[in-house]
Amino acid sequence: MALLLVLLFIVLPVAEIYVIIKVGEAIGVLPTIGLLILDGFLGAALLRHQGRAAWRRFNEALAAGRIPAREVFDGAMVIVGGAFLLAPGFITDVIGLLLLIPPSRALFRGLVSRIAVGRAGLVFTTTRWGSRARDGYRQRSRPGATYDYEGSAREVNEPEPRLPRPSGDGDP
């Protein structure tokens, strides 16, 4: 994590300054500044368009009754991409553009999910509560052990009871 912060806050700004100077030498100072300003406006427009699309897909997923994990990730990448596009510099603009374009965002989503699955381990265990469960002891389940689950439910349609209001004679 420390390496990422060093790259983000030290190496990236130095590289941005270097690229801006080289572009300025190649096309001139005023065209470089104009290109950076134009880049910011186009980035803001693309951010607005992709942000609305991500929000629409998020609401559609909720309306369909499914968990909007992909939509949340896309929304986060749109926000990060927009921040990179609004920052002055050509390297951050390329990164922001890649995060805002849906095909490259899908590639990035796949890469991040593979990394996350590789780093996170999910362990599912089942337990069988034995006769000593009341003592805080838990037995591990044995292969072929049976489990019985019981439950009941009832629907309540009546309104909640109201508490009586205190009388005004001074009694609490």
Image: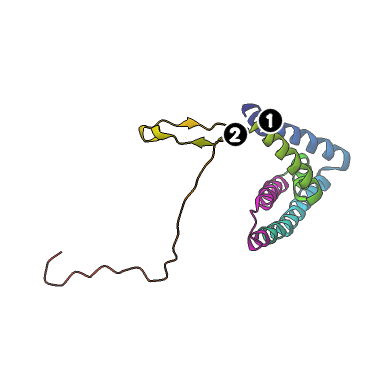
Q: State the residue at coordinates (71%, 40%).
A: 113
Mark 1 → mark 2, Cα distance in angstroms:
34 Å
Secondary structure of the residue carrying tag 1 is: helix
Magenta-drawn stretch, dominant element (helix, strand or loop) = helix
Outermost residue, right direction?
Answer: 26
Q: State the residue at coordinates (66%, 62%).
A: 64
Q: What's the magenta region?
A: 59-86
- Give the residue type at disc 1: Leu
Between 41 and 140, which is closer to the camera in this rendering?
140
The residue under label 2 is 123
Q: State the residue at coordinates (62%, 27%).
A: 2
Whether pointer 1 and pointer 2 mark residues with C-beta atoms closer than 8 Å, the reply is no
Determine crowd level at label 1: few under 14, some 14-19, many 20+ residues with C-alpha closer than 10 A.
few
Determine crowd level at label 2: few under 14, some 14-19, many 20+ residues with C-alpha closer than 10 A.
few
Queried whether the magenta region covers residue 84, the answer comes back as: yes
Q: Where 10 falls versus 158 (above or below)?
A: above
The circle on residue 7 is 1
* x and y percentages locating residue 95 in the rendered image: 76, 42
Between 116 and 158, which is closer to the camera in this rendering?
158
Secondary structure of the residue carrying tag 2 is: loop
- Give the residue type at disc 2: Val
Between 8 and 135, which is closer to the camera in this rendering?
135
* x and y percentages locating residue 20 in the rendered image: 79, 38
Q: Is residue 65 visible?
A: yes
Q: Quadrant of the N terminus?
A: top right
* x and y percentages locating residue 65 in the rendered image: 63, 60
Precedes in sequence: disc 1 or disc 2: 1
